Image (tube, coloured by chain):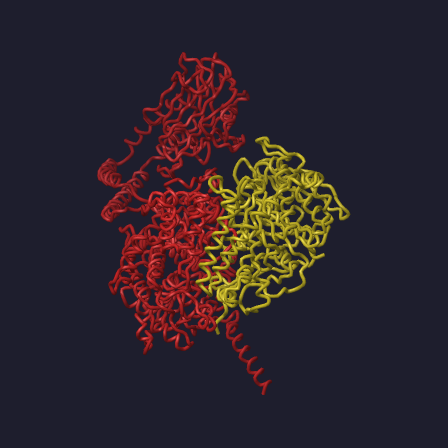
Chain colours: A yellow, B red
């Protein structure tokens, strides 16, 4: 018995139709999944060939805080830390700190207050999320595996703590395919100041075909997608248009003499798709025509060409808000997965969440920007009826310690941290999984939440059984959830 | 009857399904699998009639036999233009020149084609092309990957080794042995050392090793993952065995137990990834080895002598020596009861050379006469004088640019004594100025055992204070040539923050008073002069005691040994400087990243980890492999007190063992795949039950035996395959064959090749007349690095495509792991984070955009046009030439007319841009 591999199945698809442009094009767009459903139910092939269950959601937005955002200063209220602030920290066991952050207990930097009908306490610095807290489910008992940035970022982004695995968006693109024919399926909006740990490897397609890779979009720049327009010089719109026409003509002549290779047709079509993307992308990214009240909602009523050199809230609001608004426009136009990053590398001056020295200084502006932008996104999706089938996931590398580092900072805490989700079938106004009284480890240490569970739940809402979405690579049927993961029932609305 | 058929069909389905799932968890798979069966030379099929006329090599006879089984036939022989383009790209990755095409087309010799193959195999570009295939498999890269993704500046000697090894056609067993244990087997040969870059080729978690010690779980996880990469790379590359699947449980499908897997980890357990010094010249290496041995032996004897002297010392002498050492070292300053400040001082950017000038200057706001200038070094990383320059000068001026200035201190002629934690003070002259500048002329670098640790040279200063008219001068601002601003720890502002070497001045003098001129002068003079006086008194006393208490014979012996040692050391120092390669090696480090040097290279103990969890170690394992070779124990028979390298030699021996069923099949299948576009087994890294079955098992075995029992020459293998009729057939389809075998697994035609990213880039450079064929050496960087001190930002968009340094072949490209080069990445270039046995091949809109609009392509189209304009005068002739250069054929009259018209309207560069986007350019028939 010859197991049918992905590659032979792909060959089958390429060749079954004898140069069927339709098939080639579908593959180009990442619509393989849909096609496969009607063609070959493969016993071992990785792609989803029939939905496992009716999908609640179609789209995902992942908000990723690079450097590790503090759960206890933003979302996970710990009154004990206020009570014992400044007292020597005692965890009741030996703690392996990443640096030396086992100073006295340190209270949350901001006050907490209850919001919404659910009465969820939120930190003052993310109070903007108070408006939408009834649409959010919090998971406060997420555990990581390591306090090393790189591995932790990989784990949350790809489900594995080492390089070489596809990002979550790539898996979703691979499983569900595209919903548009002029934009990428999986878009990444990186922090404009630089990449987080691991850079583009976090959204790489790895062993999955390249069309599932996250495409970087840099809104507001002259080339928002790499090479979408020619550089200034000898190429004019006319020469470009007529050149493409000539290219098409020459390629078709070449193809006519070479029957039976659908790749030739696929490459011809790729130029047509590229031309459509050149039209679609600027339109999708142009936020100038958004009404004033929308811009205001996203905090974009405060445009400046120059910002202070010190990190500051208005600037962070502007940057993060712009990405959130761009995300909404892309989702409306059929992009399936958008990943938004906050925080670049882990260097200095800090434009990242790795606040070893001073939580207030870095987390303050970053969290304000994040909260304003993400609250606007949820609210905006809701008012357009899109929140019903769009999942918003907020995540980070790991949490930060309830004890202090130096006098104002916090060290890494991979032992517990927070994720929150909203929309797309997620229950609103709930908390699912608690941390202990300090926010040091899960309250119930034998039942923590892991990234696999979050991923399994999101796939479930997208109509995918996470155990069925596989791709064979170097002898293993790889899954986003490795060999783990269960759907968190409490999160389902 | 019908139901019987259905039942039978169900049964067949069931059996087939059961076969796949036969091996259940908890039950180890057996050796009853095609790739694990002993290699035997199969009978070569007979061919008759027309087939006999077509068959050129044994390969053809196996292929034709399969064709007969399936009612297929070879396609016609490809024409010469097609053939030459095919074989050029296949063997050297570049297009043939129009002259070469014409010569070959008109060559009437019978062996014109095989002569062409020979010529290409002899060319040095062959190694450059085929090394890329091997580098895919071993996931070679020039940065570490993971967090920060720092540069790996000495990875390239391994890349060069692979190119050379292929060009020299090293026997395969030697190629395997060198990469796993060349340092043990051929320690004096550069190949022996450079080849072990194989072990370190993959990604490395810098933070997990350099910043997290092995005592921590996070450190253990990082090292476990590191060994896992070494095991996976080795076993996939050489044996197509996915041993890494047995990390958390026994392999689900193939006969690899967890114990086998961890015994493979034990092979590498003494190693880390680090730079290793070596000699390019074997004679130098031998000399160094002998001299080092002499030095070690003398030093051991000296140590014994020192121990004897030590034993003889009276207690008061010991105490005295301690006191002197304490004063002399003053390595880190401690003030009891006062917290160390985290404000260190000013820190320049890092320079790549020591003798570069860097300056920092202060502005007093008004012109004055500095009577005294006091400098405090920065106290960091255990150095009390971190970054304090070896040579420097001080000037004052009223001009912030210092176009004219007065020198007040000149320490540029020789190295200034290391200040330690002492303040350094300089008397000012009469000179007056508003600005004072300290210029470092010889920079400092972190040291380890007296040697600079790296080539990172810096200038740092903890504090600068100036006394004028008996008062401490308030300083308005600090400027510098460059500065790393990482406040609170480092920054220009910290130069004048009142923190002197970790503590405020008041803490250092133990008085409540703050920084006053008097206090400053007091401590500055105190520390320097008093220290010197005290030391000389103590030393005199020590010398007296020493002479009185130590046996003179011992001293005499020491003197003799030192006299012998000196010329040995001098001879060592006189040897040519060593080269460095990033390799799998026993690392001799300190701090968090110790490596195993401190144990003399003893392997770390390796345990079977339950569920692959470092917190759940089980049984300790010895070094070994997998029990696949009949009659050969899977655990290596190494003596109890063996050196770590013997484990690697044993693994290499196991891999190249004649009866290893996997090794020989694996390599011939890889070579086959690169020629034909798909492997006989199309999962080249996995010959297990989850991989694919061979389409031509007998042919694979015949090739494997032929290769193993012959010279183990890869070039011979190329000759065998390329001279076959199956390779030389046309790639054009035909309806009948497609209906039988649409995927062309039986090779009734040649597979059309989509050019790889490297081949596209190199060809574009070549036809544009820009390709620089310089071989070997450091890779070129087609990006600008920003913010190198923490996480380097690799800025590809700032690179100038006209930079001639970057016009070399793509094999010499500096490969960044975290941020792959976007153009190459879009064209499906291999990802150095993955073990790439076969590249993905995609056709996407982003590829179309890249080849149309990437600034490299756009600019090269211009150069291409300029070159054509030099080669030919009429547009017609230019277009004709362009076709010959890119696709090795004349343009048809219609094609020519269309392109000429387009070129006349929009210019030749635009026409060249169209040509470089042709399907015919991107594919090879």
Q: Taking B521 as reference, is A21 above or below it?
A: below
Residue B523: x and y in percent read 46, 21
Q: Please say whether residue B470 is visible from this viewpoint.
A: yes
Q: Nearer the viewer, residue B287 or B131?
A: B131
Whether residue B643 appears in this view of the structure is no
Q: Which residue is drawn at 32% across and 72% down?
A: B54
* Front-most of residues A435 and B102: B102
Residue lying furthest right in this view?
A117
Quadrant of the drawing holding the C terminus of chain A: bottom right
Q: Residue furthest bottom?
A: B1
Residue B667 position by quadrant:
bottom left
Residue B456 vs residue B50, the one in the foreground: B50
Query: In the rendered image, which quarter is residue A411 located in?
Result: top right
B897 or A87: nearer the viewer: B897
Q: Position of residue B672 (x, y in %)?
A: 37, 64
Q: Where is residue B781 in the image (x, y as percent from the top left)?
A: 41, 43
In percent of width and height, residue B318 lies at 36, 34
Picture layout, residue A314 above or below residue B718? above
Apparent side of residue B360 relative to residue B173 in the rendered image (left or right): right
Q: Is A293 left, or right, of B779 in this rendering?
A: right
């Amino acid at each position: 018995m010859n197991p049918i591999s992905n590659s032979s199945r792909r060959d089958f698809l390429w060749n079954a139709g004898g140069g069927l442009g339709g098939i080639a094009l579908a593959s180009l767009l990442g619509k393989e999944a849909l096609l496969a459903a009607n063609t070959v139910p493969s016993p071992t092939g990785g792609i989803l060939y029939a939905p496992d269950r009716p999908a609640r959601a179609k789209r995902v937005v992942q908000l990723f805080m690079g450097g590790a955002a503090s759960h206890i200063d933003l979302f996970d209220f710990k009154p004990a830390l206020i009570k014992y602030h400044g007292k020597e920290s005692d965890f009741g066991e030996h703690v392996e700190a990443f640096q030396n952050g086992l100073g006295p207990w340190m209270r949350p930097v901001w006050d907490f207050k209850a919001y919404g009908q659910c009465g969820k306490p939120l930190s003052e610095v993310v109070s903007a999320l108070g408006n939408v807290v009834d649409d959010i489910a919090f998971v406060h008992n997420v555990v990581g595996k390591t306090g090393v940035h790189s591995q932790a970022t990989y784990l949350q982004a790809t489900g594995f703590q080492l390089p070489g695995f596809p990002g979550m968006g790539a898996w979703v693109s691979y499983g569900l395919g595209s919903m548009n024919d002029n934009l990428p399926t999986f878009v990444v909006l990186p922090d404009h100041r630089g990449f987080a740990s691991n850079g583009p490897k976090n959204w790489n397609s790895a062993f999955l075909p390249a069309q599932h890779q996250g495409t970087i979009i840099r809104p507001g720049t002259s080339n928002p997608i790499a090479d979408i327009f020619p550089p200034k010089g000898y190429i004019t719109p006319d020469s470009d248009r007529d050149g493409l026409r000539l290219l098409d003509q020459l390629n078709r002549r070449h193809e006519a003499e070479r029957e039976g290779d659908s790749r030739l047709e696929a490459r011809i079509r790729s130029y047509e798709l590229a031309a459509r993307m050149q039209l679609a992308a600027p339109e999708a990214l142009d936020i100038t025509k958004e009404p004033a009240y929308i811009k205001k909602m996203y905090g974009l009523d405060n445009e400046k060409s120059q910002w202070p050199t010190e990190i500051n809230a208005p600037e962070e609001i502007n940057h993060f808000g712009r990405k959130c608004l761009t995300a909404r426009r892309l989702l409306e136009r059929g992009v399936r997965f958008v990943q938004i990053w906050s925080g670049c590398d882990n260097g200095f001056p800090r434009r990242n969440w790795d606040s070893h020295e001073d939580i207030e200084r870095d987390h303050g502006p970053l969290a304000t920007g994040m909260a304003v932008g993400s609250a606007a996104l949820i609210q905006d999706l809701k008012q357009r009826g899109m929140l019903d089938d769009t999942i918003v996931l907020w995540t980070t590398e790991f949490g930060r310690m309830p004890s202090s580092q130096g006098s104002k900072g916090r060290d890494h805490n991979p032992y517990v941290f927070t994720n929150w989700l909203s929309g797309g079938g997620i229950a609103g106004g709930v908390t699912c999984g608690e941390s202990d009284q300090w926010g040091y480890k899960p309250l119930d240490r034998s039942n923590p939440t892991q990234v696999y569970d979050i991923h399994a739940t999101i796939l479930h809402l997208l109509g995918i059984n996470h155990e069925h979405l596989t791709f064979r690579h170097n002898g293993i049927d790889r899954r986003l959830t490795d060999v783990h993961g269960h759907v968190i029932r409490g999160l389902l609305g | 009857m019908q139901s019987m058929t259905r039942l039978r069909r169900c049964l067949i389905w069931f059996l087939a399904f059961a076969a796949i799932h036969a091996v259940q968890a908890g039950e180890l798979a057996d050796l009853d699998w095609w790739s694990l069966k002993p290699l035997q030379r199969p009978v070569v099929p007979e061919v008759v009639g027309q087939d006999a006329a077509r068959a050129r090599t044994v390969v053809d006879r196996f292929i034709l036999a399969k064709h007969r089984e399936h009612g297929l036939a070879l396609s016609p022989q490809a024409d010469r233009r097609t053939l030459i383009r095919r074989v050029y790209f296949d063997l050297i990755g570049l297009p043939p020149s129009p002259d070469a095409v014409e010569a070959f087309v008109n060559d009437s010799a019978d062996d014109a084609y095989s002569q062409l193959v020979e010529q290409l195999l002899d060319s040095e570009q062959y190694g450059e092309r085929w090394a890329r295939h091997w580098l895919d498999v071993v996931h070679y890269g020039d940065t570490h990957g993971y967090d920060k993704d720092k540069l790996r500046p000495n990875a390239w000697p391994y890349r060069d080794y692979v190119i050379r090894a292929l060009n020299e056609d090293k026997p395969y067993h030697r190629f395997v042995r060198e990469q796993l244990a060349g340092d043990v087997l051929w320690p004096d040969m550069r190949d022996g050392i450079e080849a072990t870059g194989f072990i370190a080729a993959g990604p490395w978690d810098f933070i997990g090793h350099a910043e997290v010690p092995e005592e921590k779980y996070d450190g253990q996880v990082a090292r476990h993952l590191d060994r896992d990469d070494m095991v996976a790379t080795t076993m996939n590359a050489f044996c197509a065995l996915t041993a890494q699947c047995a990390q958390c449980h026994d392999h689900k499908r193939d006969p690899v137990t967890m114990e086998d897997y961890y015994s493979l980890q034990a092979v590498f357990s003494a190693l880390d990834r680090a730079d290793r010094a070596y000699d390019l010249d074997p004679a130098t290496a031998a000399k160094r080895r002998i001299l080092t041995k002499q030095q070690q032996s003398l030093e051991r004897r000296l140590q014994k002598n020192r121990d004897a002297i030590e034993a003889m010392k009276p207690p008061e002498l010991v105490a005295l020596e301690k006191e002197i050492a304490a004063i002399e070292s003053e390595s880190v300053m401690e003030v009891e009861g006062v917290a160390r400040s985290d404000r260190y001082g000013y820190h320049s950017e890092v320079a790549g050379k020591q003798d570069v000038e860097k300056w920092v200057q202060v502005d007093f706001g008004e012109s004055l006469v500095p009577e005294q200038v006091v400098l405090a070094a920065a106290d960091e990383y255990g150095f009390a004088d971190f970054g304090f320059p070896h040579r420097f000068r001080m000037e004052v001026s009223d001009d912030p640019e210092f176009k004219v200035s007065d020198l007040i201190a000149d320490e540029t002629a020789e190295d200034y004594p290391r200040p330690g934690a002492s303040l350094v003070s300089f008397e000012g002259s009469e000179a007056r100025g508003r600005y004072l500048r300290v210029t470092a002329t010889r920079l400092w670098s972190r040291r380890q055992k007296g040697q600079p640790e790296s080539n990172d040279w810096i200038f740092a200063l903890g504090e600068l204070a100036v006394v004028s008219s008996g008062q401490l001068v308030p300083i308005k601002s600090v400027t510098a040539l460059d500065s790393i601003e990482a406040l609170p720890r480092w920054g220009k502002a910290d130069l004048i923050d009142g923190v002197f070497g970790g503590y405020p001045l008041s803490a250092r003098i133990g008085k409540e008073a703050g920084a006053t001129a008097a206090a400053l002068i007091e401590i500055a003079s105190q520390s320097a002069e008093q220290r010197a006086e005290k030391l000389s008194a103590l030393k005199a006393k020590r010398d007296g005691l020493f002479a009185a208490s130590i046996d003179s014979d011992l001293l005499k012996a020491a003197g003799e040994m030192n006299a012998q040692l000196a010329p040995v050391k001098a001879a060592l120092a006189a040897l040519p400087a060593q080269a460095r390669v990033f390799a799998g090696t026993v690392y001799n480090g300190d701090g968090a990243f110790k490596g195993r040097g401190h144990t003399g290279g003893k392997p770390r103990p390796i345990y079977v980890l339950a569920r692959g969890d470092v917190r759940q170690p089980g049984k300790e394992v010895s070094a070994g492999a997998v029990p696949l070779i009949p009659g050969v124990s899977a655990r290596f028979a190494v003596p109890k007190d063996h050196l770590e390298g013997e484990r690697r030699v044993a693994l290499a021996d196991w891999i190249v063992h004649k009866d290893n069923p996997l090794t020989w099949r694996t390599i011939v299948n890889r070579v086959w795949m690169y020629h034909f576009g798909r492997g006989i087994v199309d999962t080249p890294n996995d010959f297990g039950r989850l991989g694919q079955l061979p389409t031509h098992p007998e042919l694979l075995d015949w090739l494997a035996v032929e290769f193993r029992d012959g010279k183990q020459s890869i070039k011979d293998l190329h000759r065998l395959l390329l001279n076959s009729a199956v390779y030389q057939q046309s790639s054009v389809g035909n309806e009948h064959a497609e209906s039988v075998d649409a995927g062309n697994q039986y090779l009734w035609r040649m597979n059309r090749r989509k050019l790889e990213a490297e081949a596209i880039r190199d060809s574009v450079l070549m036809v544009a007349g820009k390709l620089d064929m310089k071989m070997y050496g450091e890779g070129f960087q087609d990006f600008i690095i920003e913010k190198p001190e923490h996480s380097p930002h690799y800025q590809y968009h700032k690179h100038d495509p006209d930079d001639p340094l970057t016009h070399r072949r793509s094999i010499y490209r500096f490969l960044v792991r975290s941020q792959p080069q976007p153009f190459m990445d879009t064209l499906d270039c291999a990802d150095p984070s993955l073990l790439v046995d076969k590249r993905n091949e995609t056709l996407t809109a982003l590829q179309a955009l890249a080849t149309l609009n990437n600034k490299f392509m756009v600019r090269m189209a211009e150069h291409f046009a300029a070159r054509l304009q030099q080669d030919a005068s009429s547009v017609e002739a230019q277009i004709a030439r362009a076709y010959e250069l890119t696709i090795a054929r004349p343009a048809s009259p219609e094609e020519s007319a269309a392109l000429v018209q387009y070129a006349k309207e929009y210019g030749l560069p635009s026409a060249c841009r169209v040509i470089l986007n042709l399907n015919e350019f991107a594919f090879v028939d």
